[in-house]
Amino acid sequence: MASLLKPKAGSVASMLAMLFGVDDLEVGDGDASLPSSAIGASYVDDEGALVAMLVADYSFAAFSGAALSMIPKGGAEDMAKDEDLSEGVRANFYEVANICSRLLMNDQSTHIKLAELVEGAALADAVGTLEGSAVIGFTVPIPRYGNGKLYFVVS
């Protein structure tokens, strides 16, 4: 099997525009420095080995999760500021991360699946096991909410 794909802004924009029900998103390339405070999603291969991570700042996590349930912007902003997602927004962000796994695969690549969401020390540990991997960052506008930062750590 071939290695995982490294997402480009255009593919991220297409995937998330479809998810958020808009015609177009202006996703920009971001830096490769992971935020100090974030939430992540771990992706594993068919043998259960960690092979990639999605890492998001709390703005992306709260806004993308809230957008799927049309939770008011003010509530999403509070969750982002407090770095504390409600159960529903957390579940929706999990689904966003699950859908984003497609950005890392094609017909020739390793098959991966979303394993779990991680925060704090568990996130730092997971990212640490992928040391030396590519970090690809994006700035993503979530319609009706605001901008968030999204990163992929790909081995």
Image (cartoon, rainbow, N blue to C red):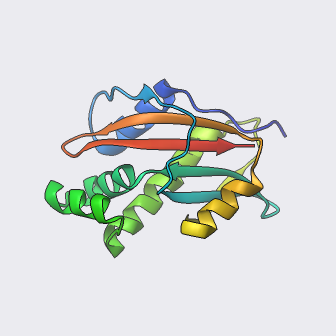
Where does residue 146 sit, x and y in percent of width and height?
25, 42
Where does residue 132 sit, x and y in percent of width and height?
77, 41
Where does residue 65 sit, x and y in percent of width and height?
34, 58
Whether 32 is drawn above or below 68: the answer is: above
Residue 70 appears in the picture as rendered: yes
Whether 25 is drawn above or below 149: the answer is: above
Residue 114 appears in the picture as rendered: no
Q: Dividing the picture into quarters, in which one does residue 82 lie?
A: bottom left
Q: Specify the farthest residue to the bottom.
A: 87
- Compare residues 66 and 77 and report the one nearer the observer: 77
Left or right: where does residue 63 sit relative to residue 52?
left
Quadrant containing the C terminus in the rendered view: top right
Q: Give the residue displayed 72% in from the left and 39% down from the top.
A: 4
- Compare residues 92 and 139 and report the one nearer the observer: 139
Q: Dividing the picture into quarters, in which one does residue 108 lie?
A: top right
Q: Give the residue displayed 31% in from the left and 72% down from the top.
A: 86
Quadrant containing the N terminus in the rendered view: top right
Q: Dividing the picture into quarters, in which one does residue 116 lie?
A: bottom right
Left or right: where does residue 55 sit relative to residue 124?
left
Q: Give the residue displayed 34% in from the left and 51% down from the top.
A: 59
Whether 9 is drawn above or below 154: the answer is: above
